[in-house]
Amino acid sequence: MSTSKFRAGDLSITKKAKRAMASNHVQADALLARHLRGDWGDTDEVSKRNNDMALSRGGALRSGYLPPDGKSIWIITGAERNSTIIMLPEDY
């Protein structure tokens, strides 16, 4: 049984995000699982509410997670739910 609230579609990870996760011993699949469960991570309450609304009404979803070095890792799933990217804010 899946606990995912939506599908990720095609997954991509930027080179900078790969390096950041490796240096912080963070696994992409662990962060992605949190994102897909609707655990929006270290985002503000407005962003969390917007994501919750986007689940039912449509719209892009963005989670943010802070690894030990404190540099945010974002996960963004497009409104069509056909692609998800793991990236750093500076990749945006």
Image (spheres, grey):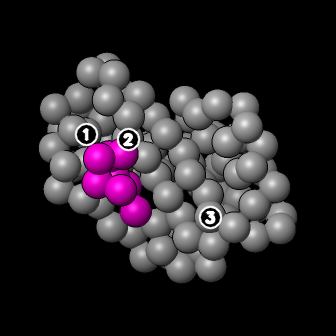
User: Eyeballing the image, is 80 above or below 13?
Assistant: below
Locate residue 17, reporting x and y percent: 25, 48
The reply to whether residue 1 is visible in this rendering is no
Q: Residue at horizontal 34%, vertical 22%?
A: 70
The reply to whether residue 34 is visible in this rendering is yes
Residues drawn in magenta: 85-92
Label 3's element? loop
Q: Residue at horizontal 56%, vertical 52%?
A: 62
Quarter of the figure with the N terminus: bottom right
Q: Is residue 71 left or right of residue 1?
A: left
User: Eyeballing the image, is 68 above or below 39?
Assistant: above
Locate residue 83, reporting x and y percent: 48, 74
Locate residue 45, reporting x and y percent: 72, 32
Label 2's element? strand
What residue is shown with label 3?
A: 60
Q: How many C-alpha atoms fall within 10 Å of the one at disc 2: few (<14), some, or many (≥20)?
A: many
Closer to the chain start, of discs 2 and 1, is 1
Q: CA distance from mark 2 to mark 1?
A: 8 Å
Residue 86: in magenta span: yes
Count the marks.
Answer: 3
